[in-house]
Image (spheres, grey):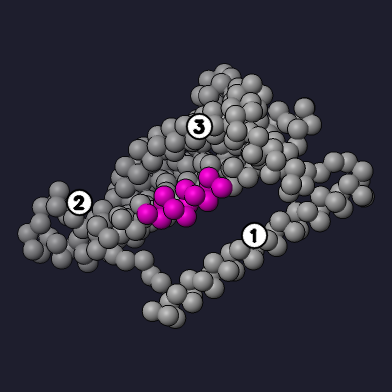
């Protein structure tokens, strides 16, 4: 018990040390940029003050920081949810059927090679300016990740499990939901994790170029014109913090819950 507590304390101490090292490096870089290039670079203090003011209600380009954050999250959730709802069933179907795999997976692999921001031209042609092109770009980068990992996982399910279920008299419905689907769960979760990060990152780029009138990405690109670089750094910190919160807290909880339900536990 004591050893476990020491391990937790040591891990927390390392985390705090890493954060302190990052802040020190940030401060050094800020002063070096001013000295070498004679241009302002936001310091830790300046960004912290701006963060407090924004969270105290000071508007950022006519909108509160809470509104910017909520709009970014809503776009990401919508694009991610649509990709998951379509990608998982399609991935399972492609992994289950050899013929469909050969027919459609080459198309999915081609889509995978296209970077998220490259979809902006198609997004603007299809949807014009506003929220829709940003949601479309998020959908595209999440969709292929979910389909590929789900299909690959479904395809890798050992036939011996299916044959064993047939020997015990299981019908196709039971085999699919009780054998095939649980065996493909871990790859599906892996695809969701990849899509999660990809979708959140491309959301920022999408807001910069899609004509959205709010959001963290929009605020960063607007700061270029107003030279409000502390606000841009605040938005970058919020992007990082929320992304880490989703990955390390929310998704980890969902992942562990699903794995417990299917009788699996995380290694380590």
In front: mark 2 or mark 1?
1
**Magenta segment:** 241-253
How far apart marks 3 and 1 lie (CA) works out to 26 Å
228 w.r.t. 3: above or below: above
78 w.r.t. 242: above or below: above
CB atoms at circles 2 and 1 under 8 Å apart? no
In front: mark 3 or mark 2?
3
- Tell me the residue at 73%/31% (across/down): 223
The answer to whether residue 114 of the structure is visible from this angle is no
Spot occupied by residue 15 in the image (x, y as percentages of width and height): 58, 64
In front: mark 3 or mark 1?
1
List the residue tagged with mark 1. 19
Magenta region's main secondary structure? helix
Q: Quadrant of the N terminus?
A: bottom left
List the residue tagged with mark 3. 70
- Tell me the residue at 75%/54% (across/down): 26
């Amino acid at each position: 018990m004591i050893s476990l507590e020491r391990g937790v304390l040591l891990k927390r101490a390392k985390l705090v040390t890493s954060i302190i090292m990052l802040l020190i490096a940030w401060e050094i870089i800020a002063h070096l940029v001013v000295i070498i290039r004679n241009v302002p670079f936001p310091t830790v203090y300046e960004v912290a003050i701006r963060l407090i003011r924004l969270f105290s209600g000071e508007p950022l380009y006519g909108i509160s920081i809470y509104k910017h954050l909520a709009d970014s999250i809503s776009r990401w959730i919508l694009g991610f949810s649509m990709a998951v709802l379509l990608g998982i069933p399609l991935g399972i179907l492609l992994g289950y059927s050899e013929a469909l795999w050969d027919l459609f997976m080459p198309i999915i692999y081609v889509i995978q090679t296209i970077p998220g921001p490259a979809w902006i031209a198609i997004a603007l042609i299809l949807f014009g300016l506003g929220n829709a092109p940003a949601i479309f770009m998020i959908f595209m980068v999440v969709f292929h990740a979910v389909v590929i990992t789900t299909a690959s996982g479904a395809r890798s399910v050992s036939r011996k499990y299916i044959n064993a279920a047939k020997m015990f008299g299981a019908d196709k419905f039971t085999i699919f939901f009780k054998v095939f689907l649980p065996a493909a769960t871990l790859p599906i979760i892996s695809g969701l994790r990849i899509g999660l990060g990809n979708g959140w990152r491309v959301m920022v780029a999408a807001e910069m170029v899609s004509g959205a009138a709010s959001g963290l990405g929009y605020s960063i690109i607007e700061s270029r014109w107003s030279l409000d670089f502390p606000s841009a750094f605040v938005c970058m910190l919020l992007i990082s913090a929320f992304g880490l919160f989703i990955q390390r807290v929310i998704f980890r909880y969902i992942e562990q819950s699903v794995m417990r339900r299917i009788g699996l536990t995380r290694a380590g």
